[in-house]
Image (cartoon, grey):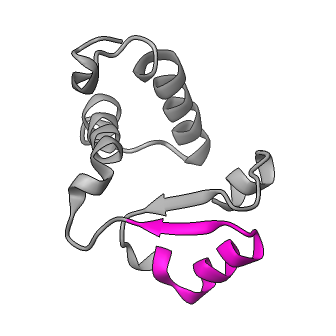
Amino acid sequence: LRHAVQSQAIRPGAIFHSDRGSQYGSRCFRAFLSEKKLRQSMSGRANPYDNAWTESLIGALKAEILQGGKFADLSDAHTELFDYIESYYNHHRKHSSIGYQT
């Protein structure tokens, strides 16, 4: 999130939505959101359907890119993820939520 805030024009009041991971509820993380004037939204307790599209993307990344492996380093992860999302996932991959269209 720090990188996104530094590299993008994120306006005050923007909403950061996440699951209920402990890192997102930590005092340090909440202070960062407050400092940047970002609002926090968390999915419902034990309710993965709040983040269904995100969970679907993460599942696709694990199955289609990682295939049980690892990235070589952070730079490799960044390059692979960017290429996958911008070149394939958003433009060519069929999505069940829109009738298996791209």
Q: Please state the horizontal and vertical placement of residue 74, each as a whole percent of the image.
A: 57, 48
- Is 26 contained in the magenta span? yes
Q: Residue at x 62, y 84 (%)?
A: 28
Q: Residue at x 40, y 79 (%)?
A: 22
Count all numbered tags in the image, as a single digit. 0
Q: Quadrant of the C terminus?
A: top left
Tell me if residue 83 comes above or below residue 76 in the rendering: above
Q: Quadrant of residue 3?
A: bottom right
Q: Nearer the viewer, residue 37 or 70?
A: 37
Q: Nearer the viewer, residue 67 or 29?
A: 29
Tell me if residue 8 comes above or below residue 101 in the rendering: below
Tell me if residue 79 comes above or below residue 75 in the rendering: above
- The residue stretch that appears in magenta: 24-42
Q: Quadrant of the N terminus?
A: bottom right
- Whether residue 9 sits left or right of residue 34 in the image: it is right
Q: Residue at x 69, y 51 (%)?
A: 4
Q: Quadrant of residue 75?
A: top right
Q: Residue at x 67, y 82 (%)?
A: 31
Q: Residue furthest front?
A: 13
- Whether residue 54 sits left or right of residue 68 in the image: it is right
Q: Please state the horizontal and vertical placement of residue 99, each as a whole percent of the image.
A: 22, 16
- Is 38 contained in the magenta span? yes
Q: Please state the horizontal and vertical placement of residue 100, each as a whole percent of the image.
A: 23, 14
- Whether residue 32 sits left or right of residue 80 in the image: it is right
Q: Nearer the viewer, residue 59 or 72?
A: 59
